[in-house]
């Protein structure tokens, strides 16, 4: 309101005000799937981060991040498993419900764990249905883009369950693919491109592109109407996702494409050492 009064003073200020009120509105608006599509057309980058519990989700939501993903990477980062495969649907529901309780603004998406959707469309409906009913999150994500997976996405979408796709490096296939970059040969790139079209056609509302060449991610982003969210897929996607445990430096080792913004392992160690010293030295409690 105060800014609105200021704009009459000169034209340069008007530009500043308009821009800042855009950010201001973004910050207080609850994020919807329709908004993600708008942001793609406006070329306003979509920010996505993972979360695994209430406290982290609440902190991330307060920053104004757009989408919070309850990623099955929590099997590795929070539960200590070697891969994402051991995570059960019940364990995922437990984490997703906690995350959702911490979120007021961001759109919350939950990964469907390994073998909670690949068996049949019926299994996918039951699993995705449980995720929505028992946790309150707004959408599910599943891995792959072949015709079978696209069919599953189509079935879920048609019964009203929003689905985010995930192609390129799909960690639930680690024993077949490893963690190498995907889509390096022209044949592989063409297959991944087709998968992006399949999933768009099937009704997915957005696509994760993981660990594929920049040019392939750019080509897919240009070709499809839904937002692409990259991780190790270059700077030409409609948004980016990072595993929050990597961003915070909670993980001992990160993928080559991750950016570590702070070292919480060190911060936690120092605080803990200070506590131990205080107790042993009778400095706490006073
Ligand atoms: N903490 C964490 N961050 C992630 O981004 C993440 C997970 N966990 N768990 C699930 C998957 C696994 N991811 C990974 C893990 C390792 C590489 C990696 O080290 N790639 C190397 C070597 C691959 C190889 O040959 O084995 C590369 O140069 O591509 C990539 C993605 C991404 N996802
Ligand atoms: C890295 C993101 C896309 C993910 O699927 C996860 O964290 O499980
Ligand atoms: Mg995942």
Image (cartoon, helix red, strand yellow):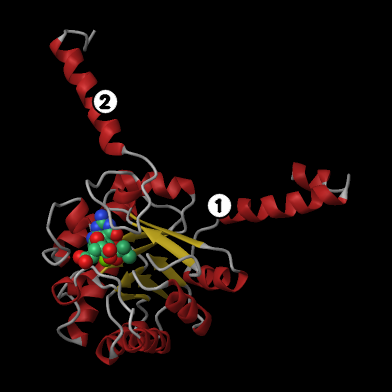
Q: Which residue is mark 2?
A: 271
Placement of 210 over or under 73, stated as above or below: below
Q: Is residue 6 left or right of residue 158?
A: right
Q: Residue at x 82, y 45 (%)?
A: 5
Placement of 76 over or under 177, stated as above or below: above
Q: Residue 224: give x, y in percent of width and height.
A: 49, 83
Q: Residue 22: give x, y in percent of width and height.
A: 65, 56
Placement of 191 over or under 60, stated as above or below: below
Callout 2: SS: helix
Q: Residues within 10 Å of mark 2 (few under 14, many from 20)?
A: few
Residue 140 is drawn in which quadrant? bottom left
Label 1 – label 2 distance at C-alpha: 32 Å
Asked if marks 1 and 2 touch (Cβ < 8 Å), the reply is no
**Looking at mark 2, is its residue's CB closer than 8 Å to ligand 1?**
no
* Foreground residue among 123 and 174: 174
Q: Is residue 283 left or right of residue 247?
A: left
Q: Residue 34: give x, y in percent of width and height.
A: 52, 72
Residue 191 is drawn in which quadrant? bottom left
Specify the label residue 153 is tagged with. Answer: none
Mark nearer the N terminus (1 vs 2): 1
Q: Is residue 135 visible?
A: no
Q: Residue at x 55, y 71 (%)?
A: 40
Q: Which residue is mark 1?
A: 27
Instruction: Give the quarter of the figure containing the N terminus.
Output: top right
Classify the position of ligand 3 by quadrant: top left, top right, bottom left or bottom right: bottom left
Q: Nearer the viewer, mark 1 or mark 2?
A: 2
């Amino acid at each position: 309101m105060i800014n609105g009064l200021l704009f009459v003073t000169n034209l340069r200020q008007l530009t500043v005000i308009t821009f800042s009120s855009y950010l201001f509105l973004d910050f207080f608006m609850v994020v919807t799937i329709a908004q993600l599509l708008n942001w793609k057309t406006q070329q306003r980058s979509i920010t996505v981060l993972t979360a695994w519990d209430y406290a982290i989700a609440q902190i991330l939501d307060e920053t104004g991040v757009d989408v919070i993903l309850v990623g099955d990477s929590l099997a590795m980062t929070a539960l200590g498993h070697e891969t994402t495969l051991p995570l059960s649907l019940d364990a995922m529901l437990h984490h997703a419900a906690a995350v959702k309780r911490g979120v007021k603004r961001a759109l919350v998406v939950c990964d469907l764990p390994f073998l909670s959707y690949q068996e049949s469309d019926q299994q996918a409906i039951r699993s995705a249905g449980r995720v929505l009913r028992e946790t309150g999150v707004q959408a599910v994500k599943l891995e792959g883009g072949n015709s079978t997976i696209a069919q599953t996405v189509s079935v879920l979408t048609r019964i009203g369950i929003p689905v985010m796709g995930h192609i390129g490096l799909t960690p639930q296939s680690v024993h077949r693919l490893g963690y190498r970059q995907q889509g390096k040969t022209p044949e592989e790139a063409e297959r991944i491109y087709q998968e992006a079209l399949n999933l768009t056609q099937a009704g997915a509302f957005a696509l994760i592109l993981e660990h594929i060449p920049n040019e392939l991610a750019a080509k897919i982003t240009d070709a499809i109407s839904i937002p692409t969210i990259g991780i190790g897929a270059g700077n030409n996607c409609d948004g980016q996702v990072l595993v929050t445990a990597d961003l915070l430096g909670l993980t001992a080792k990160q993928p080559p494409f991750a950016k570590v913004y702070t070292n919480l392992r060190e911060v936690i160690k120092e605080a803990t050492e200070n506590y131990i010293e205080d107790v042993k030295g009778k400095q706490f409690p006073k």
